[in-house]
Image: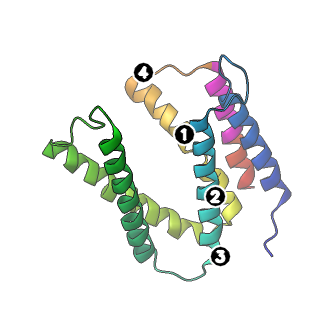
Amino acid sequence: GYSVRWTVWVACFSAMIGVVILSNTKDGYLNFSAGDLLVLAGAMSWSAYIFRLSQCGSYNEVDLQFWKTVILASLYTVWFLISQWHSEVSLWAGYGNVVAWLLLFYSALGPGAIGDVLQQKAQASIAAAEANVILATEPIFTSILGFVLLAEAVTLNEFMGGSFIIAAAVLATR
């Protein structure tokens, strides 16, 4: 089996504390809605994907990314069409705008596909547990960019929760 270092276990606990802090709402800690539970299930699926990917051995990253993108795009399209059919309002007012479609395809094929291929290549050189904790820092960088580029305010809970998650990423790589 795969042995997980003690620092990775501490990192996982630190990341969990960060998530608990970030989950604080006016109704208290760990007050999850159905949407929160779906996001948690998605995160668990992503973690399972990362761990399974590390067990695949030798594979072609571009082929894997291509099929992952095709399958997810198909599922998202079906979901969108069913949602649109059941909705009284337009779920995406810009669906007729060519520029909006070009931007959507660029963000999927450019940073999305290239980022996934690079992540898969990098993951070949580190363990899945460390990769999982490091990838959990994505919302932190999103918050930093939101602050720098859009002047969005960072709350104390976001700062504290993010600090625990960054500490987890540092610990996981030790």
User: Which is closer to the viewer, label 1 or label 4?
Assistant: 1
Task: Report if the CB atoms under discs 2 and 4 are less than 8 Å apart.
Answer: no
Residue under label 3, please give it. 55
- Find disc 4 in the rendering and name its residue: 151
- x and y, in percent, of residue 3 in the image: 82, 69
Using the image, determine if residue 81 lies above or below residue 74: above
Q: Disc 4 versus disc 3: distance between alpha carbons?
A: 42 Å
Q: Which residue is mark 2?
A: 47
Q: CA distance from mark 2 to mark 4?
A: 32 Å
Which is nearer the eye, 24 or 86?
86
Q: Which residues are magenta?
A: 156-165
Nearer the N terminus, badge 1 or badge 3?
Answer: 3
Q: Are marks 4 and 3 in contact (CB under 8 Å)?
A: no
Q: Type of residue at label 2?
A: Ser
Disc 1 + disc 4, Cβ < 8 Å: no
Of circles 4 and 3, the one toward us is: 3
Residue 168 lies in the magenta stretch? no
Q: Residues within 10 Å of mark 4 (few under 14, many from 20)?
A: few
Please tell me in which quadrant of the rendered image residue 53 appears.
bottom right
Give the residue type that dot 3 points to.
Gln
What amino acid is labelled 1 in the image? Pro
- Compute the Cα span from label 1 to label 3: 26 Å
